[in-house]
Image (spheres, grey):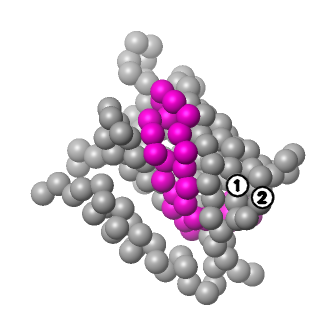
C-alpha cells in the first residue's frame, strides 16, 4: 500500500510531537532556498561518519552519471525577526522502499556569526511535478546541538527558488 504525501506528513507530525515538550524552546523558521547546484565532490560525505552513520549515500558517481549530490544557499527568518543565511550540502540516499530520500547538512548564520549546523533526513515527493520535500532534523551542533524540528520545502529546488517553513526546537537549558 502506498502512503499519500498527506498521510506521511501527518505521521511525521504526530511522531515529532514530543519535540514540543516543555524541555524545548521552539521557533518557526521560514524562508527561501535558491536553486541547488550539482556538487561533484559530494561534500555531504564529510558528515557521514558522525551524523549519518546508518546512511548509504549514492554518490559520488563517475562523470556522465546523473547527479546525486547538491549544494545550495538559503535566507530565512527564525522566530519573529532573526535574519539568517545558510548553505546546505545534500545527497540522495540508497533506499529500497521506492521513496526518494536524502540527507542534508545545513549551516545557519546570523550575520557573520555561525549559529551551527542542522542535520536532516529528507523525504522527497513528486520530484518531477509539484515537488514537496519534508526535512526532519536528526542532529545539530553549536546552538542546535540536541535540537529537533522539521520543515517543508514546496518546489523543486533543482530548477527554481522555493519557499520553506517549519519549526526548529533547541533544548531549554
**Residue extending furthest bottom?**
22
**Residue extending furthest left?**
1
Q: What segment carries the magenta color? A: 140-168
Q: Residue at x 43, y 17 (%)?
A: 62
The reply to whether residue 2 is in sight is: yes
Q: CA distance from mark 1 to mark 2?
A: 5 Å
- What SS does tag 1 mark? strand
- Within the magenta stretch, is there residue 136? no
How many discs mark residues in the rendered view? 2
Q: Residue at x 53, y 76 (%)?
A: 19
Quarter occupied by the N terminus: bottom left
Residue ID for mark 2? 82
Of the residues under marks 1 and 2, which one precedes in the sequence? 1
Point out residue 49 in the picture as x, y percentages from the top left corner: 55, 49
Residue 16 lies left or right of residue 73; in this view the side is left
Residue 24 lies left or right of residue 16; in this view the side is right
Q: Residue at x 46, y 45 (%)?
A: 154
- What SS does tag 2 mark? strand
In the rendered structure, are the residues bearing label 1 and label 2 in contact, judged by CB atoms less than 8 Å apart? yes
- Within the magenta stretch, is there residue 143? yes
Residue ID for mark 1? 77
> Callout 2: 10 Å neighbours few (<14), some, many (20+)?
few
State whether residue 65 is above or below residue 130.
above
Point out residue 14 in the picture as x, y percentages from the top left corner: 39, 74
Point out residue 25 in the picture as x, y percentages from the top left corner: 67, 76
Viewer-side residue, 142 vs 72: 72
> Callout 1: 10 Å neighbours few (<14), some, many (20+)?
some
Amino acid at each position: 500500500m502506498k502512503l499519500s504525501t498527506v498521510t506521511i506528513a501527518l505521521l511525521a507530525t504526530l511522531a515529532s510531537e514530543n519535540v514540543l515538550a516543555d524541555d524545548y524552546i521552539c521557533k518557526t523558521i521560514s524562508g527561501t532556498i535558491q536553486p541547488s547546484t550539482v556538487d561533484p565532490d559530494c561534500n555531504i560525505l564529510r558528515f557521514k561518519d558522525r551524523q549519518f552513520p546508518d546512511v548509504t549515500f549514492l554518490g559520488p558517481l563517475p562523470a556522465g552519471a546523473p547527479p546525486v549530490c547538491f549544494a545550495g544557499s538559503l535566507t530565512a527568518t527564525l522566530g519573529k525577526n532573526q535574519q539568517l543565511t545558510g548553505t546546505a550540502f545534500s545527497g540522495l540516499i540508497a533506499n529500497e522502499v521506492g521513496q526518494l530520500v536524502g540527507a542534508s547538512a545545513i549551516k545557519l548564520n546570523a550575520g557573520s556569526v555561525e549559529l551551527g549546523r542542522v542535520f536532516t533526513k529528507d523525504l522527497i515527493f513528486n520530484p518531477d511535478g509539484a515537488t514537496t520535500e519534508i526535512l526532519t532534523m536528526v542532529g545539530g551542533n553549536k546552538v542546535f546541538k540536541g535540537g529537533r524540528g522539521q520543515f517543508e520545502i514546496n518546489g523543486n529546488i533543482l530548477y527554481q527558488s522555493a519557499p520553506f517553513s517549519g519549526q526548529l526546537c533547541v533544548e531549554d537549558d
